[in-house]
Each structure stands twice: as C-alpha cells, then as structure tokens.
Amino acid sequence: MRESNRIVGELLALLAEHVAPGVSTWELNRIAEDYILSQGAVPSFKGYRVPGLEPFPSAICSSVNDCIVHGIPSKEVILKEGDIIGIDVGAFKNGFHGDGARSFRVGRIAGAAEKLLEVTREALNRGMQMARAGNRVGDISWTIGSFIRERGYSVADDLTGHGIGREMHEDPMIPNFGVAGKGPRLKAGMTLSIEPMVNIGTNQVIERGWEFFSADGSLSAHFENTLLVTDAEPEILTLPYN
C-alpha cells in the first residue's frame, strides 16, 4: 500500500507542474500513464468497470470547473486561465491500489474559486484527523460535512470515500456527511481513501455517463488522500500536498 500510494502522491506532484493554460486534459493523462508504467505499476482506473457503462478509458479522471468527478480526458478539453481542475488517479502495484486526488489552479483564479479550494482542502485535513482507531466512520463524515456546511458550501450528493486495498473500492464507504458516533468502528491497520467533493452551489449532481456535474453549473473541488489508521495520528500514504 505504501508503494502504490507513493506513486500516486509523486504523480500528483508531477502533474501540478504541467497544469497550465493551453494544456489539454489528454496530455495530462498521457503524462500520468507514462509515469505510472515507469514505476512498474498499472493505472487502476483504466478499464475499470461499473454496470451500464463502457470501461473507463483513461489513467486519470480530469474534472474541470463544474465537473465534480470522473471527468474523461480529451484532446478537445484545453485548460484556460482561471479554470480549476480536479485530477484523481490510481495506481496498482504488487496486488494493492493507491488512490488520491488534488484540485489545481490554472493560472490566476477568482477569489471564489480560491476559497473553494481552501475549504475543500481543510475539510479533508479535518476528516483525516478523525481516522483513528476506536472512532467510527460517522466521526469522519460528520467532521467533513459540518465544516463544509458551516462555510456555506455543499457536499456533492451520493459521492463518497471508501476503503481501499486489494480492491480499489472496499468497505467501509465513507460519506462526506453523517452522524458522529455512528457507522463501522475504525481499527488500526485499516487503509481508507477520504475524499470531500465540494460544490459552491447546490449539492445536487447530474450524471452524464461516467462524469458527474454540479446541477447548477457551479464550481466543484475535490481533494483525496489514502491513509493508514493507527492508534494515534493517521499515516498519509499519498504524501502531503502543497
């Protein structure tokens, strides 16, 4: 798990250097897939299947502005000044998955977009601090959701974090809102992917195939880390982000 998530964390740092006006999401995907393969891993997302959809075609999810998650890279999607882009990536090596996401600025962004990124990143930080042995999933969910609502933002509906290991998505599911003290109890040794997805406007989403969009077209941000639950501070496996 440490090795797979090291690859993810280092790749997200590499992609940060390439996010810029004029770059296509297809080019970011090419960079990501080349890096994953160079590390002796394979992309977790490419070929991933869910009922009713074609296999996911890419190594990354590239979600621009009002796309919340699962954006499909394309030569036609060219980043422009003022955009924000969420990049989610997974790597599979030695039988285990890594998973992480960051939202990036494209050049100079508006103050509202900057604040959205700050709130989403802080929601992740606060949620991760609750991932300790003896706590429950609801403690993570309540901490994330209450912070987001207090700041006047919305948790994207029906999109959750998850357990991770030999499969990319394992129990327990980790909603971004909930009731403290409820849900499965956390144990040392569990590995979890915690990922708040936050909209400036409505919590409602529109599904278009793989891609999820905010229903009112408002900006959305996404940050995710995979961590190891311990009896004290959780160990972040996807490396700290800037």
Image (cartoon, helix red, strand yellow):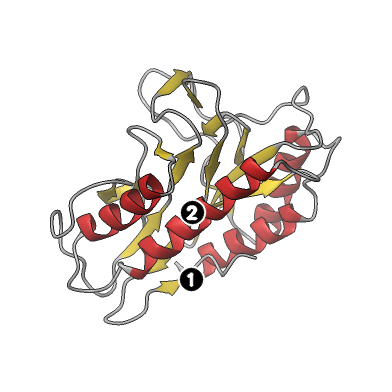
**Of tags 1 and 2, which is closer to the observer?**
2
Which residue: 29% across, 58% down?
A: 140
Residue, far bottom:
232
Q: Is 89 situated above or below 215?
A: below
* Numbered disc total: 2
Q: Position of residue 160 (x, y in %)?
A: 35, 43
Residue at numbered disc 2: 224
15 left or right of 197 in image: right
Within the image, what quadrant is residue 85 found in? top right
Which residue: 78% across, 26% down?
A: 75
Within the image, what quadrant is residue 229 found in? bottom left
N-terminal label among 1 and 2: 1
Q: Position of residue 219 (x, y in %)?
A: 57, 33
Which residue: 37% across, 37% down?
A: 159
Which image quarter holds the C terminus?
Answer: bottom right
Q: Which mark is residue 2?
A: 1
52 left or right of 120 in image: left
Residues under labels 1 and 2: Cα distance? 16 Å
Q: Position of residue 167 (x, y in %)?
A: 36, 50
Q: Secondary structure at mark 1?
A: helix
Q: Secondary structure at mark 2?
A: loop
Name the amino acid type tagged 1.
Arg
Within the image, what quadrant is residue 165 found in? bottom left
Circles 1, 2 touching at the beta carbon (< 8 Å)? no
Residue, far right:
22
Q: Is 242 situated above or below 159?
A: below
Which image quarter holds the N terminus?
Answer: bottom left
Q: Is residue 76 visible?
A: yes
Q: Position of residue 228 (x, y in %)?
A: 37, 70
Q: Nearer the viewer, residue 52 or 142?
A: 142
